Image (tube, rainbow, N blue to C red):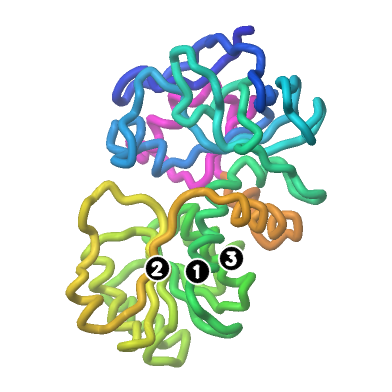
Amino acid sequence: MKTRAVVFSAIDEVGIQDIEMPAPAADEVQIQTSFSSISSGTEGWALHNLFTWAPTPFPAVPGYQRVGTISAVGDGVDGWNEGDAVMATMGSWSSSPVPFWGSHVGVANSKTEHLFRLPEGVDPIDAAATVVIQVGYNAAYRPYMEPGDWVVVIGDGPIGQFGAQAARVRGGRTILVGHRQQRLDAAAAFSADHALAESPEMVEQIRAITGQHHVPVIIDTVQRHDVQAAYLPLLQREEGQIVYSGFSPEETWASMADLHKAELTTHYISGITRPRMEATLQLMAKGKLTLSPLITHRVSFDQAPAMYQMIDTKSEPFLSIVFEW
């Protein structure tokens, strides 16, 4: 069958194409997509062939998070049925354009290992960004912390927003630092206890809020040497923790010497695991993690070229972008 898909045809070239989708193979199901969500950072790197973990196999269908309904089941599939509402991370087919990772598509096959059930109470719109929400969950659940501890989140994008939300689930008191006023307003309303604009007075402003000289945890979603240098005074020698969250294409984006001299603990976390995805979905079902109020663009999939251009040029403010299929 033919289906519509967002296709990265070459570096910085995005279009909508009809692609051929085979019947689901063994251990696969076919899903009719309802919503898919852009991971603007990673997909932007992929569009420019700068995602250093793997080259972009142009032409390719991007995206790694979508929700929909199972419309067909392959041989040997057990426990999944037509009509089930699911979240999927990867598409699965072999013809060109190939999946990378294959979620921005109207109908596509997925292996059962890439499927997740939607718990009762999960809004499908929220589930369309489960992977990115999980990145924030991962960041907040990695450090050692006690209820009431202050957590400073550096970065006002989706990962920072969800990291702040998840830290609050753990009982943390959160301060998010960024530089885009619309995103800071969203953070103050939905994600963090406090939202601050980046400034040379950041350390003093945070200390004024916390009443403390040091904070226990920094979640760094920006990962630049100058940013690290700005927040290091907030961390206590031998006790401070930094969680590096998100993707950076640079080989070196932190001063190991400065970390070593201060004897700080650093955490590195990436990727998708079933336990973390399922824990994220459970918190979404309880209303503890939410995408909906952070959506700035909910558009038809055929507007994808314009959305990627907007991300690239920053022609207007945006935070989370969801495609309707």
Q: Which residues are magenta?
A: 296-325
In terms of depth relative to the viewer, which is nearer, 324 or 11? 11
Q: Residues within 10 Å of mark 2 (few under 14, many from 20)?
A: few
Q: Residue type at mark 2: give it.
A: His
Residue 192: x and y in percent read 55, 69
Q: Quadrant of residue 275?
A: bottom right
**Mark 3: which secondary structure?**
helix
Q: Residues within 10 Å of mark 1 (few under 14, many from 20)?
A: few
In terms of depth relative to the viewer, which is nearer, 136 or 260? 260
Residue 252: x and y in percent read 21, 57
In terms of depth relative to the viewer, which is nearer, 57 or 149? 57
Q: Which residue is mark 1?
A: 142
Q: Which residue is mark 2?
A: 267
Verify CB contact (< 8 Å) between mark 2 and mark 1. yes
Q: Quadrant of residue 124?
A: top right
**Mark 2: which secondary structure?**
strand
* 11 horizontally vs 147: left or right: left
* Location of residue 267 with respect to 132 vertically, above or below: below
* 279 horizontally vs 225: left or right: right
Q: Residue type at mark 1: give it.
A: Arg
Q: Assess whether residue 310 is covered by the magenta stretch.
A: yes
Q: Give me the C-alpha separation between circle 3 and circle 2.
A: 16 Å
Q: Residue type at mark 3: give it.
A: Ala
Q: Give me the C-alpha separation between circle 3 and circle 1.
A: 11 Å
Q: Residue at x 53, y 19 (%)?
A: 93
Asked if one can make out residue 298 in the rendered structure from this viewpoint, the answer is: no
User: Residue 166: which disc?
Assistant: 3
The quadrant of the image that shows the C terminus is top right
Which is closer to the viewer, label 3 or label 2? 2
